[in-house]
Structure formats: structure tokens, C-alpha cells
Image: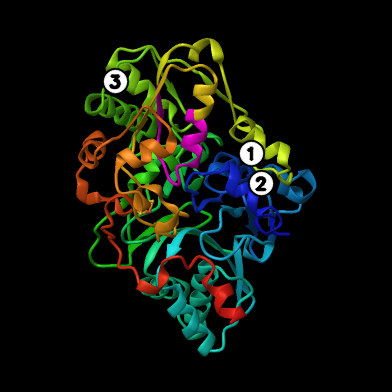
Amino acid sequence: MDFKQLYPHFIEEFDDKPKEACGVFGMIAPGEEVARLAFFGLYALQHRGQESCGIATFDNSNVFIHKDVGMVSQVFDEKNLSKLKGDIVVGHTRYSTTGSNNVCNAQPVLVSHKDKKIALAHNGNLVNANLLRESLIKNGYSFESTTDSEVMAKLIVQELDKGNDLTTAIKTTFSQCKGAYSIVIGTNDYLIAIRDPDGVRPLCIGNTSSGKYVIASESCALDIIGAAFVRDVAPGEIIFINRQQKLNSNLFVSSIKPHHCIFELIYFSRPDSTFKGLSIYHFRKELGRQLAREAPVKADYVISVPDSGTPAAIGFAEESKLPFGEALIKNRYIGRTFIQPSQMLRELGIRLKLNPIRDIIAGKKIVVVDDSIVRGNTSRKIVRLLKDSGAKEVHMRISSPPVQWPCFYGIDIDSREQLIAAKSNSIDEITKFIEADSLKYISHEGMIKSTSLQREIFCTACFSGEYPIEIPPELEGAKLRYEQAASN
Ligand code: SF4
């Protein structure tokens, strides 16, 4: 089943935000119910990918795996979780940035070398996956999926087939991989974590009260199982952890220049996660404060586009000394739905997701704060919704700069044609398109200043066009490149 193929219009129509690539989770914990803990870890990471998910567990000699299309609560139940035995676990929740969404692309990817199994879960995107895949095929390796994650797993197998030990095989594999990857690997003996030399996607280490190590995309997945944040996995670091909880760390590149995705701070990560020890919520509020200093407006109320725009809206309201009101209530349970869009649903549009509180809005000048504008359709619908609810004026304020460039590092913004800020020449044109009384974005400098960190440690390519990891020209708009190649 592939719900994008079944219901393509529905997804497009009601979901106009960039999509995260994936969430990963791993744990090595003799004596604990690791599959159940991974289930809750994946629940906390559900925002990073809602198309498919999976869990693989290992004991000393066996592997158990269950994965499918759907959200964590749809894919797992008591029956299938109870079959996932063992004390090492790797979990994954996926949005497809390379390859389409079907069950064979669900992760963890499971590969074999002799009688040993390896399960790999990946967040990010390789920019040289095509080349690596072609060379593997030339060397006689075949593929079951269309993901770059399977390319990495098969590269490890190729290195093992050459007679290398697992440490050398992993080091050699990842020194060939270019792009963004935060990875958790499970085997019968180890839990392994790997982060690319630019550290584009997040990956952190936690420790439970009984001293068991946990690896997760975000600290919110540690919190949910009662584990404490220890540290981030460093860019270019490979970590091996054994059952005795001995952690062995290696760097697989000689020079490290981090380029953390700044969009993680603005939108993707959960506000209760941390970045360099500080809450994402704190950063987002600061973005709102900075935005208020840069683009003040005389208004009656500041409201947010929930949920991701809320901390910035609170910061904007505090800095402007304006009241913050919750005027758009999110229907939290609509989520991803399999219902096909009838004419009636099309007419309901944004109302399926957001319901306005007219008492707050009617007759008022409203500042509405959101984290980003991608295509512009959702912003236009929100402005119309507020005006239909009686707003006198609607001023849109955005806590990121204009998104003008595609992302090749694991976020689904893969063509400039999709981006209103790339298509339209001016902010005035975008303001007209979304039908707002005014529109302002935070400046690039303001965004960086709000982090209190150096500009150099961030990737800001979707705002600036400056890509820290070289992009092959053939990649733009090539999300389904393997399928296209196969059908030619
Ligand atoms: S291009 Fe944008 S979304 Fe992609 S990694 Fe860089 S900052 Fe993040």
C-alpha cells in the first residue's frame, strides 16, 4: 500500500509544510523490554515521519523485525510487540525523501553477512547515493528497496565480504558516503551510532536510571522513557556500545566542520527537545522576539499558527507588549488520513485542521506568527479564515527568512518550483498572493543572532543557497530518481 499514490491530492491539499526525513531510536539494555521502550521512543519522534515505521530487535543470535506503512499507533500492537524479543533494539519512523512510500522502503533496513544480521535506521539524505548504488550493482549486489539507506547497509556488507571486521567495514563505508546521515545500527552484539561529519541531522545519547544507553534523534525520545540526556553524537563520530554498556567512540574523518540544520531549530524538532543543551522552545521564542524588533506592527492581538508557530508568537507578543491569544485551535487528531478528498472536504479546506475563535478575532487587528512559508497556499487559507472570521487586519510575521532553495539533506523541499519565495520576485507579491495586509520575514542575520551561536556552525542553504556539502547538479527534483531510472 502506498497512500501517496492512492490519495495524492489529499496530502498536497492539506499539508503545505516541509516534511522531516525520519526519526531514529536505539537501545542496548539487557533485562529491559526494549521493543516496548522503542515503541514509546518512536511515538515521541512521530513528528519526524508519519509514513512508515519499524522496530528490529536482537538477542545473541537472532533478529526479530516488524515494519509497515502507517503511524506508530497503527503499525504496532501488543501482539506484534511481544514477538520482538531480545535486548538490542533499533527503531525508525519515516517520511520518504529518497524513494517512494511503500512497505519495502520502510526501515530499519535488514541485511545479512554470512549468518550475521545488521539492522540500519537512517535520518538524512546521501547526495552521492546514485553513484554508490551503481557501483554496488556492478559488484553484484542487488536491492530490495529504492532508499539510500539500503545503499549504506549494502556498502557495509560489501566491506564485510572483503574480509574486514565490523569496525573497519563501518569506517570505510561512511568515509565514502556524502550528505546527511544520522544512523543507528543494531547487530547481535552491538548498538552502533554514526553521524555525518557535518552533523546536519540531530542525534543524541541518553542514559537510563539503570545505566543503559539510548540513542535517539531528539532528546524528547529520551525523556519519554525516563532516560537522561548525556550528550550529542559528535559530527563524524562512530560509537559502539556493548551489552556491558562499554561505549567506544571513534572519529572516521580527520577534520570536522559542523553544519547543523537551522530548520531543525525553527520548525522540525519538537519544542521540548534540546540543541546544545538549550531548549528548542527557548530558541523559537527568541526568534519571535527578534522578529518583533525587526518588524513591529500596531495590532490588538498576536496569535500563532499552531503548534510550531506558537513559541515564536509568544516571544513576539512579549517583545511587542501585545496580548497573545489562542485564536486558531488545531484539530489534533486529523493527522494523516486515508479519506479521499470529496468536493465537500475540498471546500472545508483548512477548517479540517484549524478552527478559529471568532470572539478573539472579530473586529481586531491581528498579527499571526508562523514559522515558515513554503508554497504559500496554507498561509493564504489562514489569512482568508481570519478575515472570514471578522478580522479587521491580518499581518503575517514569519520566524524564518524566505525559503528559496531546495534541501538535499533530508528535508522534502526538492524543487525551486514549489517555493513561493523563489518564484515571486518580491515580498509585496507574496503579500498579495496570501492576501495579508502586511507580511514580514525575520532577517537572515536576525535568525542567526537568535541562536547566540556562530553562523558557521549552521546549514542555512534553503534560505541562502550556500550548500555546505557539494550537490551534484543532477539531483534537483530527483526524489524518485531510482524509480525513474528503473522505468526508463
Ligand atoms: S537546506 Fe535548510 S532544511 Fe536542509 S539541512 Fe540546510 S537548513 Fe536544513
Q: Nearer the viewer, mark 2 or mark 1?
A: 1
Q: Residue at x 64, y 74 (%)?
A: 144
Question: Do labels 3 and 1 touch, CB within 8 Å?
Answer: no
Where is mark 1, residue-wise?
A: 335
Question: Do labels 2 and 1 touch, CB within 8 Å?
Answer: yes
In terms of secondary structure, where does tag 1 sit? loop
How was the colour assigned to the protein in this rendering?
A: rainbow
Q: Residue at x 48, y 35 (%)?
A: 380
The amino acid marked with disc number 3 is: Val
Q: Residues within 10 Å of mark 3 (few under 14, many from 20)?
A: some
- Residue 129: % across, % down: 45, 73
Where is mark 3, residue-wise?
A: 297
The amino acid marked with disc number 1 is: Gly
Q: CA distance from mark 3 to mark 2?
A: 41 Å
The amino acid marked with disc number 2 is: Met
Q: Residues within 10 Å of mark 1 (few under 14, many from 20)?
A: few
- Residue 21: % across, % down: 50, 53
**Residue 276 visible here:** no
In terms of secondary structure, where does tag 2 sit? loop
Q: Residue at x 40, y 74 (%)?
A: 474
Vertical order, 451 against 482 (above or below): above
Q: Which residues are magenta?
A: 367-383
Q: Residue at x 20, y 51 (%)?
A: 456
- Residue 403: % across, % down: 35, 48
Where is mark 2, residue-wise?
A: 71
Between discs 3 and 2, the one toward the N terminus:
2
Between discs 3 and 1, the one toward the N terminus:
3
Q: Quadrant of the C terminus?
A: bottom right
Q: Nearer the viewer, mark 3 or mark 2?
A: 3
Q: Is residue 204 magenta?
A: no
